[in-house]
Image (cartoon, rainbow, N blue to C red):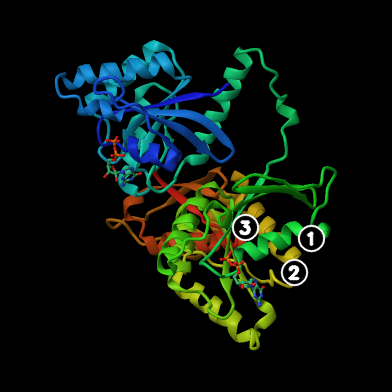
Amino acid sequence: MTLTVAIVGRPNVGKSTLFNRLVGKRLALVDDTPGVTRDRREGEGRLFDLRFRLFDTAGLEDVQDESLEGRMRRQSELAIEEADLVLLMVDARTGLTSTDEIFADQLRRSERPVVVLANKCEGRAAEAGLLEAYSLGLGDPVAFSAEHGLGLEDLYDHLKTAEEAKAAEAGEVVAEPGEKEPDVLQFAVVGRPNVGKSTLINRLLGEERLLTGPEAGITRDSISVEWTYNDRPIRLIDTAGMRRKARVSEKLEKLAVADALRAVQYAHVVILLLDAEEGLERQDLTIANHTIEEGRALVIAINKWDVVKDRDAVIAGVRDRLQRSLPQVKGIPVVTVSGLKGRNLDGLLDAAIDAYDVWNTKVATPDLNRWLHEVEAAHPPPMAHGRRNRLKYISQPKARPPTFTLFCAQPKDLPDSYLRYLENELRHDFELPGTPIRFLLRKSR
Ligand code: GDP
Ligand code: GDP
């Protein structure tokens, strides 16, 4: 029994971008008889371990012989009729329009479960729009960015809830809340061609000693393998298995990066594998940057350690490059391995599990506020319009990655350099090395 989800919203808010992110290449090509199916795209959506049927009503906008309002009414009627959950997308950068209100009205009256996605929330320009979205009366809007992957965890929670509600309605047994399965850690091994991804994955799976826990064993499908290590269920996303090797090497390089970028979407922790002889190259930085932007934890693994002569120089080279090119994320773990010889595989898995735990860190609000007063006193923010820009309050609404809401008197006047100072201190004082950290700035009254 599959959950059916619809995306609705006025043109240009980002519906197709979200659709493409969730469905990707698995788009089910529906029969394109004009007027019948042109008005929507449908496909199997995936978000982490969830699978659902997703449709996007964007195509309705191309129908010429109807007023915008008429088309929109049809769009939401369709969604209301067919969907278990409706995602109403608004553009937080431009703010609400009367069109958004029309959708909201109709959906509110339908009493269908709705989640408001305040899209394009990746920057500060969206703050006002996000707050406005509360006024739609459809619950707390999710601060979202279809393009940058912000808010996917919140979306996941909503989808999960809807799925459970649907199962309960159908009389299926739902797990008791207290009996939640332990979280499956999703790792992806990515890297350029020939760095040794396949060798490493095969080695990991061939090592009996890495299989521990009560139900130790390996299950494998085309793109992932699952096993238990130190009582932690791990799912490894196998990008190498995602595609047969192509023939042309230049093309192969591009495809490998494209695969990596896609795999990041499904991973909690991205293990970026390097060839020790080559170090950290531009393509690797592209993948590393993307991982951080997507809010995933990152571990760098230098492979082929068995053939390295000057070990200190290799590690120093990689660290130096990280420091210069990704200065915003201090303390990215770097481990050395040999997939071929099976060396330090435990070290690699331990580092990935540590990175996962850091990424899941939730700091208590009182601790955060004590900390805030200390760092503010040590180094106050610059004056704003001749007045002190007081930092009022901080909380952490979510982990994965750690995301903090900071209230201050004049958020627009808080320079980025000051935010970097806060981030560095936070990273240091609450032991959050190597994980992306996000700040949401709010104006306090
Ligand atoms: P649709 O008409 O609702 O399907 O919107 P599209 O998905 O075609 O997106 C409209 C425009 O918004 C495109 O230029 C996208 O690149 C852009 N867009 C989509 N999502 C985001 C986002 O999260 N942030 C920003 N800044 N732009 C976005
Ligand atoms: P992939 O393209 O990233 O999947 O790379 P492969 O796993 O196919 O490995 C590419 C080449 O590197 C093969 O010749 C492997 O034998 C070799 N290789 C992989 N891991 C190691 C290692 O740890 N040490 C050494 N010396 N060679 C390795």
Residue 71 screen position, x and y as percent: 23, 20
Residue 392 screen position, x and y as percent: 46, 47
Residue 37 screen position, x and y as percent: 31, 23
Q: Is residue 442 left or right of residue 359?
A: left
> SS class of the residue under badge 1?
loop
Residue placed furthest toward the front? 247
Residue placed furthest toward the right? 214
Find disc 2 in the rendering and name its residue.
Answer: 342
Residue 52 screen position, x and y as percent: 51, 29
Compared to residue 27, the image places residue 323 above or below, namely below
Find disc 3 in the rendering and name its residue.
Answer: 430
> SS class of the residue under badge 3?
loop
Which numbered disc, 1 or 2, marks the residue that appears first in the sequence? 1
Q: Residue at x 67, y 60 (%)?
A: 201
Quadrant in the picture for residue 168:
top right
The label on residue 166 is none
Find disc 1 in the rendering and name its residue.
Answer: 207
Identify which amino acid the numbered label 2 is placed on.
Answer: Gly
Residue 193 visible here: yes
Q: Label 3 to label 1, Cα distance in Å? A: 35 Å
**Quadrant location of the N terminus in the rendered image:** top right
Instruction: Give neighbour class at mark 2: few <14, some 14-19, many 20+ (Cα, 10 Å).
Output: some
